[in-house]
Image (tube, rainbow, N blue to C red):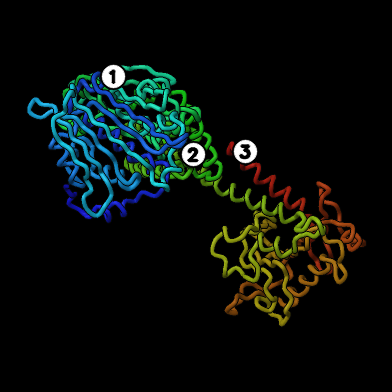
Amino acid sequence: MADLVSDIVGRVSRLPLKPSETNALLPLMEAFSNALHAVNLRFGDDAPSKGRIQITILRDSNEVIGFKIEDNGIGFTDENYRSFRTPDSRHKIGLGGKGVGRLSWLRVFGGAKIESVYVDGGQFLRRSFDFVLDESNQLRNELNGAAIGATAPRTIITLGEFKSEYKSRCPSKPETLVQRLIAHFLPILASGACPSAELIDGDDAFDLPTYFKDKIVNTSVADVPVKLDDGSEITISVRHMKCNKDIRPRGQSYNWMFLCAHERSVTEQCIDDQIGLRSLDGESIYIGCASGAYLDESVNQERDGFTFSSSKETLIRRGVASSVREYLADYIAVSRAEMVRNTQALVRENPQFLFINNEIDTFVEALPLNSAGKQEEIFVSMSRRRYRRQREFRRLSEEIASPPSHKEEIQEKVDEYMRYVDDEKKGALAEYVSKRKAILDFLDALTAYEDPERRRHHLEDAVHALICPMKIDSSQIADIDDHNLWLLDDRLAFFNFFASDKEARSYLNTGSQERPDLAFLYDSCLAWREGEQSGDKVVLVEFKRPGLEAYPNEDPIRQALRYVNLIKSSKTFRDKSGRVISNVGERTSFDCYIVADLTEGLRKQLIGLPLQPTPDGEGMFGYTDNPKAFVEIVPFSKLLKDAKARNSAFFTRLGLNG
């Protein structure tokens, strides 16, 4: 008896083979792979025509319990037997073997039975043994001697009885097993290098190469000229195949390209990202095989790579990829259309990229084909394109600053510069206007019911906070984006001073703790042009709850006028440190805006006040004598309508759907 020189029990127990369909079939795949290697070793390039492999399903009633794998390969020669006895053997590294596949036979089946006929010194010999999982004597019942009556080498590996945890994971339908075998050995089947291989299930027989051919939905062959970096030109023949997705390899990959030599696959590459596609029509995958005299002449001795330089390989793959894109042009066009839609959507959301609309076909053509559905990657490409445009803009600026002597060349660069500036201005403006639109949508929601079942509106504080943060003054505002005063009037952004929901005593010469919603002080020549002799202007804004009917204490007009009197009596605006900002004098004018719905309850409060309907009939305005002040009531519907109209005009001008 002979032992493997290793802690086999410990080694097998550490194999990461959780019960699953893939792991249940791993011993079969390893045995089939060994059979392929044996056939190739015996027949070489004649393996496709002379090699034979047969897999027989072993059943107990209808349940699959194991497999028998027979081949007419080289057999268990002394060299192969020594390799078998050595875990992690390097004997088949050149053929893609890892030296541990047979350990899966012990993990999933507990062992295997091997019978083999091989040739040694012109004589047929027979070798047989049992391979079992045990602390010692893993190779048992060994026989090795003359093979009486044998006429050719062959090997039979019997994987006898599944362990219970794997048995239930093994597919019982032979068609499923054929699909799994084809998917696992796709390279050799696609390249046409597979020997005769059958799966036998009782009276049924399935020929794997034939089954694979039947799964080809469409095929064509294209000759691709490739110019190499040494100036020579070669021709690569590409066989394009559209196949049923049933035979795709397990995992995340769908579409494959194989570079072949002498009708056998040498290198394989998943090309999902290169073509930007997964399944075709949801039902098919792409398989391509590239071959030709140059590849035949350049394959290395181990048949696992080529001897030409990486630069030549890049040129070959580039030419092959071009042919693949031509074959899959209809599918790629659909993917490109999706990229156009995604790009347009991103431009609408990020108008700083508005210039891309003018070059969208060129932009999308330059995107990686796998960008369809990946908005983040498209956004990164848009940002990169914008950065490069800005860099070009700076170059143009420098050239214009030091122009050449020819007038025509100067004008050409100036025209190019102006086109760039126009696009950039549009993008920046559209980005700002888009933010306005989002704010308008939010304001629209705030003017509706907060609780429709109880017919309860949002509080006025919600609207106030949207238009301007509360409990702050102008010293705490750093940028125009810190408020949305434009919802009321674009001129409100030009204040000298303002306070939002702050106690009057914090900025007026008064001890009053009252808090006007918004109080503004203006140098009127900045925003409100009322003549050279005009003094400062004070603007007061009061918010009331949308839809409010009851005003039991005081109507909003009288409330605003009371604030006017408070400011007039205080006479001085001061900042938070106490410095005088402005004095209130006789020429100081007051404008009061009441943002409130003209409900029946509010209309009753306005009886007797000098107010008239606004020209559009939606609000009311007038001028009071005591105190002197301009007053306007702005219903929420009017506020929203007017602001939307201003915003919509920008969108129309920019050609965006507003």
- Disc 1 vs disc 3: which is toward the camera? 1
- Examine the rendered structure and indicate whether residue 298 appears above or below residue 382: above
Q: Are marks 1 and 3 in contact (CB under 8 Å)?
A: no
Where residue 613 appears, as percent x and y from the top left, is: 85, 52
Name the amino acid, label 1: Ser
**Label 1: which residue?**
237
Image height of 199 relative to 14, above or below: above
User: SS at mark 3?
Assistant: loop
Q: Which residue is mark 2?
A: 373
Q: Amino acid at mark 3?
A: Asn
**Numbered label tally:** 3
Q: Is residue 243 left or right of residue 610?
A: left
Q: Nearer the viewer, residue 350 or 9?
A: 9
Tag in front: 2 or 3: 2
Say whether residue 411 is visible. no
x and y, in percent, of residue 566 in the image: 76, 75
The residue tagged with tag 2: helix, strand or loop? loop
**Quarter of the view holding residue 46:** top left
Q: Does residue 415 appear to the left or right of 579 in the view shown?
A: left
Residue 657 has which mark? 3
Element type at mark 1: strand
- Tell me if mark 3 has few (under 14), some (14-19) or many (20+) residues whose alpha carbon lies within 10 angstroms of its own: few
Quadrant of the image occupied by residue 534: bottom right
Within 10 angstroms of label 1, few (less than 14), some, or many (20 or more) residues?
A: some
Q: Nearer the viewer, residue 478 or 550?
A: 550
Amino acid type, mark 2 = Gly
Mark 3 or mark 1, which is nearer the start of the sequence?
Answer: 1
